[in-house]
């Protein structure tokens, strides 16, 4: 059995996986030939065995020849170029081959090996530019060594099953000792973005991901937890040792969400259906169970409301939208009718209000429903559509409230959204992003125009490569005036034209702080000779993704007066809308079907200064939010430091203000216990607290004193750990030499 995930952009597999047993190893020998894979999807470039010639790289097998010598047919299959990557000779013939031999020895010893491997770390280098295979910086392989037994290999895998993961530099001079390159599957997941072992139970998968062959996983130990009681959705800090690669945390057998603060601390959320009982932590080294029980306290239904708007609002808009979400952040199910009310500011008029399961009244701007909402669940969102008056103020605030449903906490029943109203015409205007006027090109012997040809018109905040001829486009002979292009467009199909690089490309990118949406090509004037290509295709590529077809192109006119294509609509292609800064978008014209000369141009049909090729779109500014503004928008639908979103606001029954919950990474809509823990287990008064890694605008200040009535100071406070996710400090002097000592944590935003 062998599976391949092939990447046309790379010209090689992303990964190859196969099963290896002693029965796969025979005496058929090695195929004398490599084969072009003609079964690839239409339009894929079919890498040729000769493409590697003179590249300095071996045609490196992923599934090796010697793993498929049971018969000639199976051996031939691994010689298809779709199973091949560019490998440095010292990698392929040295360490890679040695590890392959070691794997076969394990299989011949009675084991069944599940193997996956592939390339990683691409820098853009290729063995033939833009044609054949990309050169990886590393080769990687993961081998699960399954002992013999009944049933499938999958059923015989446990958390103790040996797993070998390698990451090897794809360079000459690399060591031939494979043990020098042992890593974990989790590291390869980080490198590649792939997820391994997804068919296994989570606890077994976690164990296999963390294994580093030759190293042992230590069993976890729980030394305590705080607080000892609390409501569901609250935070419990579990302390102990050997928590690395924790797979699960349970409360009396019910799994809960958690964050691994450090090897010695986990912050866990009490799950909705938890009951009183012990806490357990499972890692690849085993499961630890607390010596004491955590007591789950009861609470009531607690409805919370969130409000956010979509897109940019401008004077005169007729269909801008707000989204209203109702969530039960309590533990008990709601009961009775629930009413959501909206208070629109002057300048906005509601035109529609709807949501699945809601009964809407546009006159009163209310939505109601009576079906019960379980703790931790949310209703389907409500969408409110509004029209913006032509004289609306520059900022307005929309307000929403929720009531009823046996809600026990009114503090989070209100939400507002500060909305910026742009002046009419400021946002959403289609402009010419790029325009080319070829009227001034004189033609003549070999004068087909420079490549790249910069645009005559370019919109602010847009950067472009200009029009670029592919290396397969010719420029010999006499060129027409008022024209830019070339000849030798002789390929018989679009795929053949791409392979021969008989293409025209233009790339664009938008500046930082903006997005761009590509809406149309309203002007596309051409000219071709009688033997020039009559057909083509327009394609696009986003980033390093694959090229996709936009539309077929037809060039019926072959006279000196040229012709014009109908406008090409791009607004319906989602990939080309709201493209962010730094993301390159490439358009590719692939012409084919030409005769011996195959001449084709972008042409000045009208003989005027008007552009002859135009790309239009919308360039929009992006609102850059500070970290705390992003947090407020996530939870409250507003960036405003006011009302329920204010730093000082306390919107649940726990008494913890928003700024503190932001600093600790807590859900502001859910009651929580303070995650700050103090202890004296080390002989010092020590304080531990989680940190929100996204809260880069927060300062954590720990102070101590001998008497709460005396001044607090940072003198004598020593940091033991201070990472992006965890803070731990102790206060000097030691407990044994101090009659009393107090510590506190102050949180400020800078």
Image (cartoon, rainbow, N blue to C red):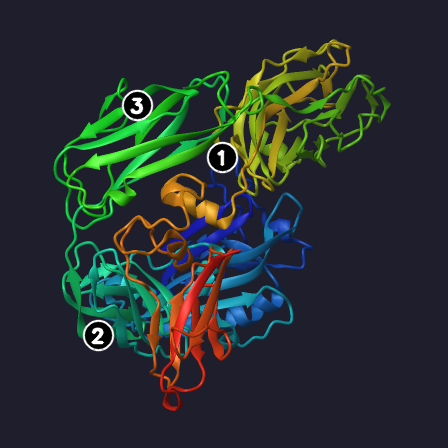
| Circle 1 or circle 2, nearest the eye | 2
As measured in the structure, the alpha-carbon distance from the residue carrying label 3 to the one carrying label 1 is 47 Å
Q: Is residue 87 shown left or right of residue 723? A: right
Q: How packed is label 1: few (under 14 Cα within 10 Å), some, or many (20 or more)? A: few
User: Mark 3 falls on what kind of element?
Assistant: strand
Q: Position of residue 491 (x, y in %)?
A: 64, 29
**Dot 2 surroundings within 10 Å: few (below 14), some, or many (20 or more)?**
some
Instruction: In the rendered structure, find residue 162 and report the number of the disc placed on it.
Output: none
Identity of the residue drawn at 39% across and 56% down: 195
Residue 290 got which mark?
2
Using the rendered image of the protein, determine whether residue 189 is visible from the camera's viewpoint: yes
Residue occupied by mark 1: 42
Residue wearing tag 3: 353
Residue 22 visible from this viewpoint: no
Residue at 59% over, 50% down: 133
| Mark 3–mark 1 CB contact (< 8 Å) | no
Q: Residue furthest front?
A: 709
Within 10 Å of disc 3 (Cα), the crowding (few <14, some 14-19, many 20+) is: many
């Amino acid at each position: 059995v062998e599976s391949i995930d092939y990447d046309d952009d790379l010209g090689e597999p992303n990964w190859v996986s196969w099963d290896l047993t002693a029965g796969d190893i025979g005496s058929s020998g090695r195929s004398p030939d490599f084969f072009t894979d003609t079964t690839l999807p239409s339009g894929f470039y079919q890498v040729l065995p000769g493409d590697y010639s003179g590249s300095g790289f071996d045609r490196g097998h992923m599934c090796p020849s010697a793993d498929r010598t049971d018969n000639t047919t199976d051996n031939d299959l691994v010689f298809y170029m779709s199973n091949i990557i560019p490998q440095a000779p010292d990698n392929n013939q040295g360490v890679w081959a040695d590890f392959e031999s070691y794997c076969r020895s394990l299989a011949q010893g009675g084991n069944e090996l599940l193997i996956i491997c592939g390339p990683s770390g691409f820098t853009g280098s290729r063995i033939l530019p833009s044609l054949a295979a990309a050169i990886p910086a590393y080769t990687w392989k993961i081998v699960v060594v399954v002992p013999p037994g009944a049933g499938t290999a999958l059923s015989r895998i446990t958390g103790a099953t040996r797993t070998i993961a390698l990451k090897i530099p794809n360079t000459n001079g690399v060591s031939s000792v494979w043990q020098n390159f042992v890593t974990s599957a989790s590291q390869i997941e980080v490198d590649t973005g792939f997820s391994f072992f997804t068919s296994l139970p989570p606890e077994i998968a976690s164990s296999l991901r963390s294994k580093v062959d030759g190293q042992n996983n230590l069993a976890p130990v729980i030394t305590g937890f705080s607080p000892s009681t609390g409501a569901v959705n609250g935070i419990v800090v579990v302390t102990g040792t050997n928590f690395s690669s924790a797979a699960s945390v349970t409360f009396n057998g019910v799994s809960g969400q958690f964050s691994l603060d450090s090897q010695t601390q986990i912050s866990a959320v009490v799950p909705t259906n938890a009951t009183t009982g012990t806490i357990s932590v499972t890692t690849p080294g085993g499961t630890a169970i607390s010596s004491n029980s955590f007591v789950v306290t009861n609470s009531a239904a607690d409805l919370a409301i969130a409000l956010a708007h979509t897109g940019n609002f401008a004077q005169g808009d007729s269909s801008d939208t707000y989204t209203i979400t109702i969530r039960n952040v309590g533990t008990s199910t709601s009961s009775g009718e629930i009413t959501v009310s909206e208070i629109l500011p002057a300048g906005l008029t509601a035109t529609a209000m709807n949501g699945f399961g809601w009964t809407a009244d546009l006159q009163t701007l209310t939505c109601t429903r009576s079906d019960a909402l379980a703790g931790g669940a949310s209703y389907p969102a409500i969408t409110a559509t509004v029209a913006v008056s032509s004289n609306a103020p520059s900022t307005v605030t929309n307000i929403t409230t929720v009531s009823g449903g046996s809600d026990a906490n009114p503090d989070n029943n209100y939400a507002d959204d500060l909305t910026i109203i742009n002046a009419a015409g400021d946002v959403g205007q289609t402009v010419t992003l790029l325009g080319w006027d070829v009227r001034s090109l004189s033609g003549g012997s070999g004068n087909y125009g420079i490549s790249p040809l910069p645009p005559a018109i370019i919109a602010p905040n847009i950067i472009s490569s200009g029009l670029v001829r592919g290396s397969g486009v010719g420029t010999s002979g006499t060129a027409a005036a008022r024209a830019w292009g070339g000849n030798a467009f002789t390929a018989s199909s679009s795929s053949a034209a791409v392979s021969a690089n008989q293409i025209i490309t233009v790339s664009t990118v938008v500046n930082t702080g903006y997005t761009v949406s590509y809406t149309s090509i309203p002007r596309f004037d051409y000219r071709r000779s009688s033997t020039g290509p009559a057909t083509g295709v327009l394609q696009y590529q986003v980033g390093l993704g694959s090229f996709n077809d936009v539309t077929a192109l037809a060039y019926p006119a072959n006279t000196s007066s040229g012709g014009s294509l109908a406008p090409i609509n791009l607004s319906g292609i989602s990939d080309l809308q709201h493209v962010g800064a730094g993301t390159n978008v490439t358009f590719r014209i692939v012409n084919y079907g030409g005769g011996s000369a195959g001449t084709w141009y972008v042409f000045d049909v009208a003989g005027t200064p008007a552009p002859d090729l135009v790309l239009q779109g919308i360039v929009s500014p992006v609102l850059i939010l500070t970290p705390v503004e992003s947090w407020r928008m996530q939870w409250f639908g507003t960036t405003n430091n006011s009302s329920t979103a204010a730093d000082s606001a306390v919107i649940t029954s726990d008494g913890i203000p928003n700024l503190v919950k932001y600093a600790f990474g807590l859900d502001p809509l859910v009651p929580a216990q303070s995650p700050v823990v103090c202890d004296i287990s080390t002989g010092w008064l020590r304080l531990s607290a989680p940190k929100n890694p996204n809260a880069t605008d927060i300062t954590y200040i720990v102070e101590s004193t001998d008497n709460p009535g005396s001044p607090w100071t940072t003198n004598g406070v020593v940091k033991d750990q201070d990472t992006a996710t965890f803070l731990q400090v102790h206060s000097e002097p030691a407990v044994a030499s101090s009659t009393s000592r107090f510590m506190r944590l102050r949180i400020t935003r800078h």
